[in-house]
């Protein structure tokens, strides 16, 4: 029997089986040389996800041309910083080290965006609206030698080469095999500091983690164009084809806020932003209120996910900021899918939907969203008068000048509330969801969420959740429940029951959009062992929005590793 005589469906099944057979570390590139049909099939597999070191970028530009560009769905740029030795591993980067690393990072991102800026969206070889996701990670080869012996930070590591679906068991098996091949990588450092290749416990573990924080957290990566060659513009190129930006928790080196925002600004048609980070030991001082004003979210953005990890050994929980919560509420009014975990509290995001003191209403004038709202309601004459006063630089600030003009025309200041006309999925965390909070405090969270949902006509799923070592809680609203009715599900480890006002508030939402009442289901998750956020994330409907699947597997593995260390008395 000849290959071409086999039905096409069977031929595809054969080719797909070859991919599965080689997914455990084998190579499929030789198969592309068999025939043009095999080449077309396997090139889609080979070019679908590309993992690049900065030294590979020019080769990437040479090889990925014409129709191959349409095959690229994901580009992982793994930026390698300078190495350091044992004498420097527990010390903060000095100015010279920081400058070298910033320039390495800047040059790698600049060169990548320069290549992608040449990719057309239209025409014969245009990528259309299916451009690649750009993933960034930053590491020094020394990080794993001195601090993170079990995290494979410098590895080209995905559980599968062609997709991101991965079970915890598959992840652990692959990771264990990877580690066995490099078990001696930290021997020199371990012998010098007495760790014997094992994770230290107690005070030693704290000291090792503290040293890692000093080395890695104390300096944030900042754009520095000093190492670019002559004739190159000292600004990042604009790449319209990039569809998404991903930074997973595997990258423990963190970008400064200004650098991150500048990268996003150079991706003008970005649709997806997914950022996972560790809460640094040395907390950034952030202009929270101006964060998204400077970002001014691209109108193309459809999905925003931010996950802030937490290491209880070396980190202090940063205080939640009302300003940052309001900035995110104002700046995400056009997104379709939104998840913010442990960066803000749901109380801050829904701050405008909680009962207000009338004396504080005018304080919202400092928010740019409020200013835009008031400006849109001024008559043309009032707007011209306001701008004339602004040009004359009168002693009163623009905020109060606007307030004066609005009051003169309308008499009073309206209560400002954001709206989300496109939002379909929303996941937020709240530290108040714990068994020590009062019933009134907990019910207030769910009522303010319902009030905000009145401004979300497309909402399909909302989840508010929290996890501690001893408790978990998930509040879920789904537009379509198991019997076709809108549904609320409450899962808690201490048997929390919703108050009647909560149910009444959500009935107002469902009557407005469905003319139906909500169905309520309450569950107790007693006995759950909560040794990692992954335990709770697995229970979320929006888990794929909250955190990357590989990151969830990493959390599970880290928890299992810690438990083995404790069980064995190491």
Image: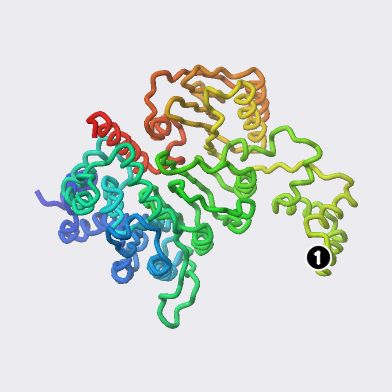
Please provide percent x and percent y for residue 101: 38, 65
Please tell me whether residue 449 is drawn above or below residue 215 in the rendered image: above
User: In the picture provided, is 351 more to the left or to the right than 50?
Assistant: right
Q: Quadrant of the C terminus?
A: top left
Using the image as rendered, state which of residue 231 and residue 203 is in the foreground: 203
Question: What residue is at 17 percent from the left and 60 percent from the top?
Answer: 35
Using the image as rendered, state which of residue 316 and residue 320 is in the foreground: 316
Please provide percent x and percent y for residue 318: 53, 43
Observer able to see residue 71? no
User: In the picture provided, is 22 more to the left or to the right than 360?
Assistant: left
Q: In which quarter of the image is residue 215?
A: bottom left
Image colouring: rainbow
Question: What residue is at 63 percent from the left and 48 percent from the top?
Answer: 327
Question: What residue is at 68 percent from the left and 26 percent from the top?
Answer: 508
Please provide percent x and percent y for residue 62: 30, 71
Please tell me whether residue 144 is drawn above or below residue 352 in the rendered image: below
Helix, strand or loop at label 1? It is helix
| Dot 1 alpha-carbon crowd within 10 angstroms: few under 14, some 14 to 19, many 20 or more | some
User: In the picture provided, is 480 more to the left or to the right than 154?
Assistant: right
Using the image as rendered, state which of residue 187 and residue 168 is in the foreground: 187
**Residue at the disc numbered 1:** 390
Please provide percent x and percent y for residue 84: 30, 62
Question: What residue is at 84 percent from the left and 67 percent from the top?
Answer: 388
- Residue occupying the far left of the picture: 1
Observer able to see residue 360? yes
């Amino acid at each position: 029997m000849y290959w071409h005589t086999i039905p096409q469906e069977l031929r595809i099944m054969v080719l797909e089986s070859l991919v599965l057979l080689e997914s455990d570390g084998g190579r499929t590139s030789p198969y592309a040389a068999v025939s043009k049909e095999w080449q077309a099939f396997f090139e889609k597999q080979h070019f679908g996800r590309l993992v690049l070191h900065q030294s590979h970028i020019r080769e990437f530009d040479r090889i990925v041309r014409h129709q191959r560009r349409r095959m690229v769905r994901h580009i992982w740029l793994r930026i390698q910083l300078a190495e350091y030795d044992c004498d420097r591993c527990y010390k903060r980067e000095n100015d010279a080290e920081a400058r070298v690393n910033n320039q390495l990072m800047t040059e790698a991102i600049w060169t990548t965006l320069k290549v992608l800026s040449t990719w057309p969206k239209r025409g014969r070889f245009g990528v259309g609206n299916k451009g690649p996701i750009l993933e960034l990670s930053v590491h020094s080869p020394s990080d794993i030698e001195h601090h993170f012996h079990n995290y494979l930070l410098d590895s080209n590591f995905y559980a599968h080469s062609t997709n991101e679906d991965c079970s915890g068991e598959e992840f652990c098996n692959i990771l264990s095999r990877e580690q066995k091949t490099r078990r001696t990588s930290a021997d020199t450092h371990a012998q010098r500091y007495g760790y014997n290749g094992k994770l230290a416990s107690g005070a030693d573990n704290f000291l090792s983690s503290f040293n890692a924080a000093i080395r890695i957290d104390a300096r944030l990566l900042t754009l520095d164009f000093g190492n670019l060659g002559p004739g190159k513009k000292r600004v990042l190129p604009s790449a319209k084809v990039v569809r998404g930006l991903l930074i997973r928790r595997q990258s423990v080196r963190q970008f400064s806020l200004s650098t991150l925002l500048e990268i996003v600004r150079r991706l003008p048609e970005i649709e997806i932003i997914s950022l996972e980070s560790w809460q640094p030991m040395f907390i950034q001082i952030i202009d929270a209120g101006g964060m998204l004003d400077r970002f001014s979210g691209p109108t193309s953005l459809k999905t925003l996910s931010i996950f802030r990890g937490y290491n209880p050994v070396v980190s202090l929980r940063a205080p939640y900021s009302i300003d940052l919560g309001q900035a995110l509420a104002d700046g995400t009014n056009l997104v379709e899918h939104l998840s913010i975990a442990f960066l803000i509290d749901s109380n801050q995001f829904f701050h405008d939907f909680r009962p207000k003191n009338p004396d504080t209403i005018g304080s919202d004038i400092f928010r740019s969203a409020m200013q835009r709202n008031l400006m849109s309601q001024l008559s043309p004459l009032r707007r011209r008068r306001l701008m004339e006063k602004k040009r004359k630089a009168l002693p009163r600030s623009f905020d109060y000048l606007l307030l004066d003009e609005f009051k003169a025309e309308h008499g009073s200041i309206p209560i400002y509330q954001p709206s989300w006309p496109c939002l379909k999925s929303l996941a937020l965390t709240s530290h108040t969801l714990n068994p020590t909070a009062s019933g009134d405090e907990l019910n207030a969270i769910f009522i303010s969420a319902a009030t905000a949902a009145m401004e979300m006509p497309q909402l399909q799923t909302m989840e508010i959740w929290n996890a501690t070592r001893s408790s978990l809680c998930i509040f879920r609203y789904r537009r379509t429940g198991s019997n076709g009715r809108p549904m609320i599900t409450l899962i808690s480890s201490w048997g929390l029951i919703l108050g009647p006002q909560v149910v009444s508030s959500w009935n107002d939402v469902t009557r407005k959009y469905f003319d139906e009442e909500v169905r309520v289901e309450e569950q107790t998750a007693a006995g759950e062992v909560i040794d990692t956020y992954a335990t709770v994330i697995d229970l979320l409907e929006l888990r794929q929005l909250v955190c990357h699947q590989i990151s969830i597997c990493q959390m599970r593995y880290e928890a299992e590793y810690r438990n083995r260390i404790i069980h064995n008395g190491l």
